[in-house]
Amino acid sequence: MYNCDVKRMDEKIKTFSTFGDAGHGGITRYSLSPEAHMARDYFVKRMEAIGATIETDDMANMYATLPGSEPGLKRIVMGSHADSVRNGGNYDGILGVIGAMEVLEAIAAENIPHRHPVTAMIWTNEEGSLYPPAMMSSGVVCYDYLPEDIAKKFKKENMLASKSVLDKTTTFGDALNASPYKGDEKNRLNPNDYMAMFELHIEQGPILEDAGKDVGVVTCVLGMFNYRIRFFGQSDHAGTTPMHKRQDALYAAAQALCYLHEEIDKLGRPELVYTTGEIVCHPNVHTVIPDMIDFSIDVRHEDPKVLEQVLAIVKSLPNKEWARCKCEVEMAWQRDTVYFDKELVQYVKESADELGASNQYINSGAGHDAQFASYMIPTTMIFVPSKEGHSHCEPEYTPVESCTEGASVMLNAVLKADKK
Amino acid sequence: MYNCDVKRMDEKIKTFSTFGDAGHGGITRYSLSPEAHMARDYFVKRMEAIGATIETDDMANMYATLPGSEPGLKRIVMGSHADSVRNGGNYDGILGVIGAMEVLEAIAAENIPHRHPVTAMIWTNEEGSLYPPAMMSSGVVCYDYLPEDIAKKFKKENMLASKSVLDKTTTFGDALNASPYKGDEKNRLNPNDYMAMFELHIEQGPILEDAGKDVGVVTCVLGMFNYRIRFFGQSDHAGTTPMHKRQDALYAAAQALCYLHEEIDKLGRPELVYTTGEIVCHPNVHTVIPDMIDFSIDVRHEDPKVLEQVLAIVKSLPNKEWARCKCEVEMAWQRDTVYFDKELVQYVKESADELGASNQYINSGAGHDAQFASYMIPTTMIFVPSKEGHSHCEPEYTPVESCTEGASVMLNAVLKADKK
């Protein structure tokens, strides 16, 4: 068994945390921003220092590769993303990059024998915070392998045209053209040159911490659906419209939201998660009765039958009475549960056991680039605990020892794959 | 008894409807916009055509005056506003301007004897749609007469600094300086030069239509309070946070909103109106649990005791359990019921009766410039029915015959006041 180095890990975590430091413990590091380029420069500097070769593809995904001992073998790749949400934390995404860099640095420092080339990777724009959608580059790179209804969301020309949510003008294509890291399409991750992919990530939830486990052996990314639920009422003056005449879309939506909680909770599925995270109100003026509410519902579970039960509740809304308002529901998107490669999952499990890292099987409620990659090449993920389960926010935290343990599990799992 | 002219009214209603025509039956005519200036130009053109003198004050309020037969008497003024909400209708505000113009045109056309000078007026920026707050100019002009807690919201320097809600940069002061209708402070409505004020307005509610009445004799503007209700939870990832660990501010707010409806309705006050018109959600992303919801509640009733009962319900919210979120409530503003001048109310009632216009006493749930003016000089209002009670929206409609009847009631009430 080999171990990664806490001091090297700490150095990388601390340094990456300075690129986009938002001043209160977290970062804002949008993809292809100046801060993100500083992070990429640092990746290049460290990887070149150990003799890795740097390549970039047409989506500015970056690949740093150490050659293996046997010519002609496919590469084993590890990686994640270096961009963050607005006021995000110092671990989501970047830990997978740091872990991949650390595996290469450990291999170089300790001259660990390996047959296959080993690659550390940065995926561009996983969060899609500035240029939606999320998982943009893995969507483009894995396009030909994705189910059709998912693939159609990732047509490269549409991605290039994606507008900045800040200035509503600059496109992702503009940012890409301005990046020194835009490279050649021939360098993309592909099944002819790559044998397997690993992604180390924080759990982003409280399950490992609550269970007192060091490492999560990820088996799948949960299936999910995302619907929009809309209510249409009548806009009228707050001071002059008697209550019994009103068609108040916000009251309708509030009732429906409570009803959804009641009915979904009745299914008695503690592992089911559902979220109404976004709400839009029109005209949203304190003296006017709202005539339109549009809210999102995001539902995730491994079992498609459970998702169907929840969907039936969502779809029943338009048949009920909601404060005299009309109700519509519309699918925004859905995905089936994506199971990771059984062999790679087993390598992760064995490595954790052999390292003495307490571990458990876990699924991923969040989406990751690994989930798209897994349609193309054998892929899996490794989770380390998130303090109090926080993520996509500044309190996000995982101790460096825990991060290093995750990287060590990845290193040994890579070496198991390398034997193949 | 004198009557106003349907044809002249129709001409004015139709012409004003072209200034800011939004293309589907209504208008968007922000105060001091090019469209609003076209409306003012038309006001000047018609008023000068009957020999009225035009004056404007430092808030660009406009006054068109026909002299009376006895020198030295105070003016009787009628008016309302010419600006609209976004995608508003063709009657709110502008009908009071049209009615005032019509009274002057009828007086001029029929040589109706009157002792006092008679003035038609346009108040600037009543809606406050582009530059908040609403009733800005009447607030500034009546500043010294308003209750202190209301007055402090209308300091002229703060009004001039009010920023456009569209470009967040241009101020009301900029718009005022660019207007050819900015005049002199000495021309402001004031109690030395003005004896009484009348404002004709659409009801903006369904009460007159439901009762089959032609005219509403307005007795007061309802007391009200406006509170902000906020919930603070914890932002976490939608896919990774178990339901029992969540502090979902939107779920908390939805439960509280339903609770408010239940508890307020238990008071059994059918004439009470309350509205939750505005809701803000943070971070408002479909994959993130909301950590902050801020919504408004606007409550109106004539009786302060009833308002206190509702306020007690609102203030009880922070003491209850709302999905593990913290709750705060904060007063945004409040006003007491404002009663109109009894004598003027009586003139309106008598005029309606004498004209054979079916009528009833009614209160105003909406705020109007007349309510601020009434702190300074004797003031009252006249309502005509709103089709289906709609207002602040494009379906807003009142037949021209009904508008004309309202103007005729105002004409005769003015002539009764003129006898004084």
Image (tube, coloured by chain):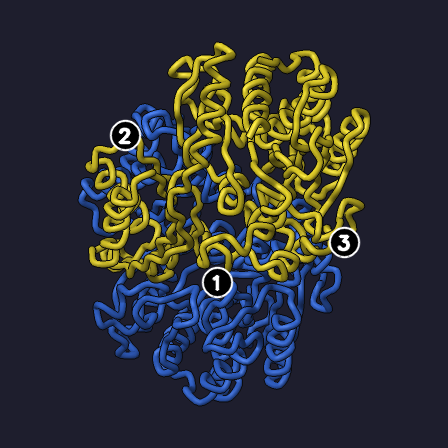
Chain colours: A blue, B yellow
Observer able to see residue B240:
no
Q: Earlier in the sequence, mark 3 or mark 2?
A: 3
Q: Is residue B229 left or right of residue B194?
A: left
Chain that bears disc 3: B
Foreground residue, B234 or A232?
A: A232
Image disc number at residue B177: 3
The kind of secondary structure element at disc 2 is loop
Q: Amino acid at mark 1?
A: Met
Foreground residue, B414 or A205?
A: B414
Which residue is tagged 2? B270
Determine whether A397 is above or below B416 in the image.
Answer: below
10 Å crowding of disc 2: few (<14), some (14-19), many (20+) = few
Q: Quadrant of residue A352?
A: bottom left
Q: Amino acid at mark 3?
A: Asn
Tell me if label 2 and label 1 are in contact, CB under 8 Å.
no
Please name the residue shown 47% across and 54% down the image.
Answer: B150
